[in-house]
Image (cartoon, helix red, strand yellow):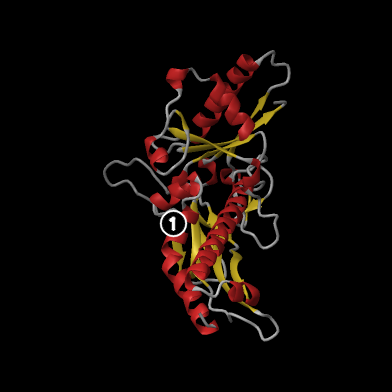
């Protein structure tokens, strides 16, 4: 197989794999999989940043009788949150040496499959770390650690200063484990904290639907449940996730490698989260040169440009566990 044929095979492999790659990356953790199911992973058709309306007050409302004046009071009820997109790419590179050693079709197909799978795994881990991160990684988008903060009254998210805008604060509850005599007492305190936070986050039919817990907190929650209380979520199971239930929410654990904060949990209402990406940058092949004159290799890049966005922070909650 000559160099031109190898390039064509690489291009065809990536093009044919794109839909599966998109599905696998967006289905790699329960938060993204749920957003995808709800149609909340959406493309954008341009813009220097990502903007969305934020409703922070009710419109004018009054009771009246007969010919009472209804008034024309203007109120500032809607603002705007602005998010800066992050850009990332994973590469699939075939060196000249690799192409020479795998010149036969079966060998090169096997090598391409391994390279493509590795690029997929790289994208999964990179996007998941950004999802749970705080945006402090250079050029990354802002993640849940900032959007659902452990200090809700501090910091700017989406261009809005939470210190100046109380309505732009997520909920937060701290569970102190200091002095707890045993796991039974620790579990009791955890359940009390979870109950308090859940009630703060839920308004009417707007309820927490996903709770993510760090491994140690999840272990404490699981160990405290009786066997007949360990309900799993059928939808999450169908997506391949091992979960528990807490009221209306699906509970899942995230490992330290995901960048999920230790000794913490997120209470999320995914109706108020989005992953927004730019057209042609939703895990698509980038239109870049495949090689350079001074490098004996062929490279394809799979790119992403977008951000995790939230336009109603006060429907999310942060669980902070100390002394565990």
Quarter of the view holding residue 293: bottom right
Residue 164 shown left or right of residue 7 in the figure: right
Q: Is the residue 116 above or below the residue 64 in the image?
A: below
Residue 72 is drawn in which quadrant?
bottom left
Instruction: Assign a secondary structure to mark 1.
Output: helix
Q: Residue at x 59, y 53 (%)?
A: 125
Across and down, in percent, residue 81 comes to 55, 57
> Which residue has dot 1 on it?
23
Task: Identify the residue at the far bottom of this view.
Answer: 293
Identify the image quadrant of the C terminus: top right
Give the class, few, some or many, for how many residues have Cα within 10 Å of label 1's Cα (few <14, many ≥20). few
Quadrant assignment, res 184: top right
Q: Is residue 58 visible?
A: no
Q: In the rendered view, would you say 324 is above or below 154?
A: above
- Residue 43 placed where, x, y %? 45, 64
**Residue drawn where x is 54% and y is 25% of the image:** 222
Vertical placement of residue 243 versus 313, above or below: above
């Amino acid at each position: 197989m000559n160099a031109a044929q190898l390039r064509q095979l690489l291009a065809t492999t990536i093009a044919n794999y794109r839909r599966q790659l998109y599905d696998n990356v967006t289905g790699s953790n329960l938060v993204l999989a749920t957003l995808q199911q709800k149609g909340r992973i959406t493309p954008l058709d341009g813009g220097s940043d990502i903007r969305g309306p934020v409703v922070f007050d009710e419109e004018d409302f009054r009771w009246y009788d007969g010919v009472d004046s209804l008034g024309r009071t203007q109120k500032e009820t809607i603002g705007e949150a602005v998010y800066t997109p992050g850009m990332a790419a994973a590469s699939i590179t075939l060196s000249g040496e690799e192409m020479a050693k795998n010149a036969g079709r079966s060998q090169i197909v096997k090598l391409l499959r391994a390279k493509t799978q590795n690029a997929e795994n790289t994208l999964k881990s990179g996007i998941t770390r950004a999802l749970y991160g705080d945006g402090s990684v250079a050029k990354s988008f802002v993640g849940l650690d900032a959007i659902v903060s452990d200090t809700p009254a501090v910091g700017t998210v989406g261009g809005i200063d939470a210190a100046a805008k109380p309505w732009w604060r997520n909920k937060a509850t701290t569970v102190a484990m200091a002095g707890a005599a045993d796991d039974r007492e620790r579990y009791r305190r955890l359940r009390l904290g979870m109950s308090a936070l859940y009630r703060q986050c839920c308004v009417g039919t707007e309820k927490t639907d996903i709770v993510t817990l760090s491994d140690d907190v999840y272990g404490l929650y699981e160990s405290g449940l009786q066997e007949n209380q360990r309900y799993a979520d059928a939808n999450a199971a169908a997506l391949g996730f091992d979960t528990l239930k807490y009221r209306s929410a699906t509970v899942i654990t995230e490992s330290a490698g995901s960048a999920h904060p230790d000794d913490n949990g997120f209470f999320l209402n995914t109706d108020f989260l989005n992953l927004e990406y730019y057209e042609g940058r939703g895990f698509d092949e980038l239109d870049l040169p495949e090689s350079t004159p001074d490098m004996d290799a062929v490279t394809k890049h799979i790119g992403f440009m977008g951000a995790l966005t939230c336009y109603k922070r006060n429907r999310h909650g942060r669980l902070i566990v100390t002394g565990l």
